[in-house]
Amino acid sequence: MTTMKIMFVCHGNICRSPMAEFIMKKLVQEKGLEDQILISSSATSTEEIGNPVYPPARKKLAEYGISCEGKYAVQLKKSDYQKYDLFLVMDDNNLFNICRIFPSDPEKKIHKLLSYAKRSDSVADPWYTGDFEKAYQDIYTGCTALLEHIRKGNISHE
């Protein structure tokens, strides 16, 4: 099996997308699939580039035994489209902004994370709500459903 490459994307890459990256890495590790699935995260904006994961997001991950040590915000690049198989955004704003970086999505690689859980809503943004538990639960739900799709041999969410 070839390695699947997944990129989680949010606005700043300091809350939701790194939470998704490390939640997914833990789920993948628990299933023994680390050498089959490569996971990263990035930002659509430049505001937080180089900054570590936001302390309340780090704290929430640690409550679940997940470390995000060494993660710093990076920006999504146009060249990433050819390097990754899937881009999972957290909300409609991320979807709008990713389309400014990737003017088209001919391979249908861009999806909202919660679409894999058959949900049309967005991952709650803890930057504004302060509710990191809700964000964690949304992300965990999306990542669990995504991994199930991948394990069944499905890449798309249709």
Image (cartoon, rainbow, N blue to C red):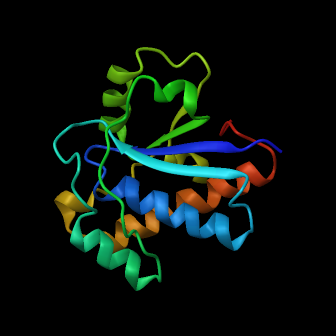
User: How far across and how far down the image is residue 117, in percent?
Assistant: 59, 54
From the viewer's perspective, tell me whether residue 2 is left or right of residue 67.
Answer: right
Q: Is residue 137 visible?
A: yes
User: How far across and how far down the image is residue 96, in percent?
Assistant: 33, 28
Q: Above or below — where is 56 with respect to 118?
A: below
Q: Residue furthest front?
A: 70
Q: Nearer the viewer, residue 105 or 30?
A: 30
Q: Quadrant of residue 92?
A: top left
From the viewer's perspective, tell me whether residue 146 is left or right of residue 103.
Answer: right
Q: Above or below — where is 89 with respect to 129?
A: above
User: How far across and how far down the image is residue 141, in percent?
Assistant: 54, 63
Q: Quadrant of the C terminus?
A: top right
User: How far across and how far down the image is residue 124, in percent?
Assistant: 33, 58
Please give the name of the residue rendered at 27% of the width and 43% of the height, measured from the top-left corner. 11
Please give the name of the residue rendered at 67% of the width and 36% of the height, measured from the top-left corner. 156
How many marks do you count on the picture? 0
Q: Above or below — where is 53 with respect to 38?
A: below
Please give the name of the residue rendered at 31% of the width and 72% of the height, measured from the top-left corner. 58
Q: Quadrant of the N terminus?
A: top right
Q: Quadrant of residue 128?
A: bottom left
Q: Is residue 119 visible?
A: no
Q: Above or below — where is 31 with respect to 154?
A: below
Please give the name of the residue rendered at 68% of the width and 61% of the height, measured from the top-left corner. 34
